[in-house]
Image (cartoon, grey):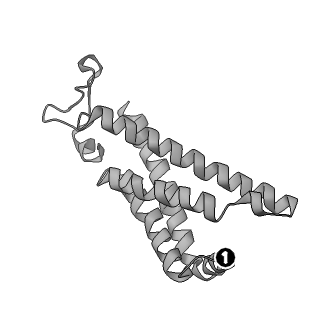
Amino acid sequence: MFLLLLIGRIILGGYFIMNGVTHLSGFKMIKQYAEYKKLPMPGFGVVISGLAWLIGGLAILLGVYIQLGIWLLIIFLLGAAFKFHDFWNEADFNVKMAQQAHFAKNIALAASLLVILGLLKISGDNLAIRGSGLVCKVRPGLCQPVPTGWRKFIY
């Protein structure tokens, strides 16, 4: 279980970090799109959204302030889905289909993050490593030893 959690955090956190870097490095192009979509203060919005990608991704990857990072991502993903990927307002079929795919992706990612938040609420700090070197408490029978060097990567 520990290895699955670690792999999942690396992939999911890495995905958001990669998108944050891409978002900020493509600032000019994304700002132009934000202007086209009539976002107030488009430059500021691009920076804030890029930072949300980065902070959220790092929170997931490192397990630091993970709930705050996830909420930042959820807010960003839902806002972007409805403001930037409003496929229902597109006339061109190809643009409509591309925007619909982006809309669905953002909604699915936000829903997945809500599931993770729910699991964190259920487990509380029970996913944390205790001095015994075991991951447990929710179901004591499922406790598994974790290699000492890896303990810092758990929530």
Residue 1 placement (x, y as % from top left) = 38, 30
The residue at the point 50 percent across, 66 percent down is: 20
Q: Is residue 21 above or below residue 142?
A: below
Q: Disc 1 on helix, strand or loop?
A: helix
Residue 154 placement (x, y as % from top left) = 29, 43
The residue at the point 79 percent across, 63 percent down is: 90
Name the residue tied to disc 1. 33
Say which of 11 and 64 sits in front. Answer: 64
Say which of 72 and 60 sits in front. Answer: 72
Q: How many marks?
A: 1
The residue at the far top in this view is 141
Disc 1 crowd, CA 10 A, few/some/many (<14, 14-19, 20+): some
Residue 148 placement (x, y as % from top left) = 21, 40
The residue at the point 46 percent across, 73 percent down is: 48
Q: Quadrant of residue 65?
A: bottom left
Q: Quadrant of residue 37?
A: bottom right
The residue at the point 54 percent across, 57 percent down is: 77
Residue 76 placement (x, y as % from top left) = 50, 61
Say which of 136 and 52 sits in front. Answer: 52
| Quarter occupied by the C terminus | top left
Query: What type is the residue that disc 1 sits on?
Result: Tyr
Q: Is residue 63 above or below residue 126?
A: below
Q: Is residue 79 above or below residue 26?
A: above
Q: In the rendered view, does 145 fall on the left or right side of 27?
A: left
